Structures are given as C-alpha cells and as structure tokens.
Amino acid sequence: MKKRLFGMVLICFFISGISLVKGQLVYGNQKDSYEIILPSGIIVLETPITVEDIQFYEDGGTIGVIIKDKNDKKFMFCLDGRMQEIKFGETPKPTHVYVGAVYPETKGAQSIPIGGKEEKSILDVLQAWLDQELSSDEKEALLTKNSVIGLSEKELKAHRILHIIKSLKNRQI
C-alpha cells in the first residue's frame, strides 16, 4: 500500500510539472530559492527574483547589477570590464566578478575566483531571471542584435544580463 501511494505521489508530481531538486520543490524550471556562494558564506535568494538595477560604466564595459528577491533581500555584484593594457598580439585576460558592490573599486567590493563555484551560483540566478522574463524567441532575437540602440528598457536589461551570462559560461570549470 505504501509503495502504491508513493508511486501515485510521484505520478502527480510528474503530471503537474513539479519535481524535487536538492530537497527543494521545483515548478517546471523554477526553484523556490537560489544559493549564491560567496567567500564569506552563502546568500539565499527566494523567488521570484528581480533585477532591480543594472549600471553600465564607460570604463571599458563594467556592468553592475543589483538583484532583489521576494523578501527585498538585495545582492550586488559587477563584472569588471575596465580597459586592460595589453601588448600587440596578446589576448586580454579574463576579468573578475566582484560581489558586494556594483563597481570593482567601491568599498566592500570583493573579487571571486574566475570560473569557480561562486560565479556558477551567480550564473544560475541570472539564467533563472532571464528564463522568467523572456521567451526563447525573445532571447534569440536579442542575441542577434548588433546594437542596443532602439531597445526597450526591458530588452536593454536582458541584453546586458545575456552579456554577463555569455561571459561567465565561457569560463566555467
């Protein structure tokens, strides 16, 4: 009787699109919370997550992001895009993500390892936000745009998040 009941519960989860991932209920692809791994500990952000603000700096391309969860808990980080001095023929070095601030030189900004689990946890949150905000067709259309001119505020925000996602995905260990 217990096996039959357990089987029926699993069938109900399957039919409704609910599954259990790492002890958390997941609705479709949406988790109820995300953990951001930091050198100082773990921050848990509960869904829905919003990108409250994105700041683009004219220092070569640093992008600062403020994320807010359903309880108004905020998480700030930036992808360093400051100009690098490189010699002819050299490839620019990957730049760090800084947590705790929206600009690398701001007091409290702390770099995290390039390509590490810390970056991966931020990547997961950004991907979840993008999936909740845009359809596959909308994401594809943004990826093919060569310019940000004429983009709506929503599209511009998503375009910059896509840039960060692309940068971080290319360096995951």
Image (cartoon, rainbow, N blue to C red):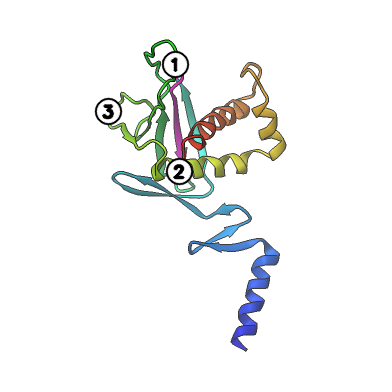
Residue under pointer 2: 120
* Residue 33 x/y as whole percent: 48, 53
Q: Quadrant of residue 160?
A: top right
The type of residue carrying mark 1 is Gly
Amino acid carrying label 3: it is Lys
The answer to whether 103 is drawn above or below residue 128 in the figure is above
Looking at the image, the residue that sits furthest to the front is 89
Q: Quadrant of the N terminus?
A: bottom right
Q: Is residue 37 above or below residue 59?
A: below
The span from disc 2 to disc 3 (Cα, nearest Å) is 24 Å
Q: Amino acid at mark 2?
A: Lys
User: Looking at the rendered structure, which numbered label has been put on residue 4?
Assistant: none
The residue that disc 3 covers is 107
Magenta stretch? 57-67
Front tag of 3 and 1: 1
Dot 2 or dot 3: first in sequence order is 3
* Residue positioned 28% across, 32% down in the render: 108
Closer to the chain start, of discs 2 and 1, is 1
Residue receiving disc 1: 60
Front residue of this view, candidates 22 and 151: 22
